[in-house]
Image: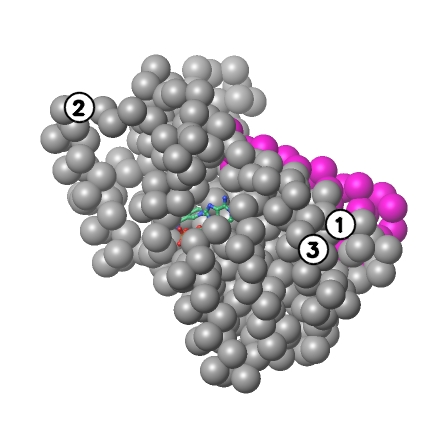
Amino acid sequence: MEELTGRVAVITGGASGMGRAFADRFAAAGMNVVLGDIEEPVLAQAVTELEATGAEVLGMRCDVSDHESVLALRDATFDRFGAAHVVCLNAGVAGGGTILEQTVNSWNWVLGVNLFGIVHGLDAFLPGLVEQDEGHVLMTASIAGHLSIAGLAPYNASKHATVTIAESLYAELQEAGSRVGVSCLCPGFVATNIFTSERNRPEALLDAPVEPVDPERELARQALVEWIAANALGADTVADLVHDAVISDNFWIFTDDQHLEAVAERHGAIRERRNPVTGRLTEGLFD
Ligand SMILES: NC(=O)c1ccc[n+]([C@@H]2O[C@H](COP(=O)([O-])OP(=O)(O)OC[C@H]3O[C@@H](n4cnc5c(N)ncnc54)[C@H](O)[C@@H]3O)[C@@H](O)[C@H]2O)c1
């Protein structure tokens, strides 16, 4: 999509972190912006701040794990702006723990938001994009969609699924001769609120508290959060990459090269039938 001015960007998870930065970037490019998010006070604040810049903004409570809620976001978008052009399926949550420790509630929560959020978003918005034969779908995956990081299985699974859905959609639209573009965003570490994802976990999917909390694991988590706040890429930098990828119709968006060696190592192990290389994502980070 070369021309963004006056068009409509829809962003799920648009109240915080990367989604909020996409909203700022697309509004600065002259787009009307729709934010769908589950966290209402932050959403209201985002709408106020964006409107203060002169942008036309619709903010709506939307739970992407709920099909009806995403259909309502689409209907409200069409009622207010008449169309959607750049659809960013970005809402996501992360929860840690080994597979042995996972509960079915945790799998349902992470896959419900990260995977079914994508499914519901495509079901709601793709037909309109294809019919108007103009637009772009951005799916926020992760470098975790290319690796199998110990202690993050539900998240890894949701992001591997996102990568292959994005690739499949790209292939299908190419084969159909469609002018609708697709991008797959695969960030490494970005300074956002992802590490407090539990704030948005529905009560029905809560786990019983684990007592006592493992102090070593809690310290490692805290160290990672502090490292990310101090060193990780800013969400506004990612938003620039996303804006440029939409304009240039680029499929892959990687935010840095930090983990590409690990991805190549995984591909090599698959090619040569070697056992998987293990090691946590953060190995070597604090050296
Ligand atoms: N921050 C990173 O290092 C990183 C790395 C790779 C991928 N990602 C992905 O980036 C995307 C954006 O996350 P972020 O890092 O900006 O975190 P964030 O927590 O700052 O933003 C995520 C947003 O999603 C919203 N959300 C959560 N559950 C929702 C639901 N059920 N329905 C609608 N909205 C919901 C939250 O309220 C929040 O506004 C996610 O898909 C995440 O998995 C993040």
Residue 220 drawn at (x, y percent): 19, 37
Point out the tag, 1 or 2, that comes first from the N-terminus.
Answer: 1
Q: Which residue is drawn at 40% across and 39% down?
A: 201
Does the image show residue 161?
Answer: yes
Q: Where is residue 210 in the image (x, y as percent from the top left)?
A: 22, 24
Residue 219, by quadrant, is top left
Q: Residue at x 68, y 62 (%)?
A: 77
Amino acid, disc 2: Glu
Q: Do the residues labelled 3 and 2 touch (CB within 8 Å)?
A: no
User: How far, Cα to Cα, is label 1 from label 2?
Assistant: 45 Å
Q: Do tag 1 and tag 3 residues touch (Cβ < 8 Å)?
A: no
Q: Which of marks 1 and 3 is in front?
A: 3
Residue 147: percent from left, percent from top: 46, 32
Q: Is residue 178 magenta?
A: yes
- Could you tell which of marks 3 and 2 lies nearer the N-terminus? 3
Find disc 3 in the rendering and name its residue: 74
Q: What mark, if any, has residue 211 been given in the picture?
A: 2
Quadrant into which the N terminus falls? bottom right
Residues drawn in magenta: 156-184
Determine which residue is flagged by label 1.
Answer: 126
Q: In this view, does 4 lie to the left or right of 63?
A: right
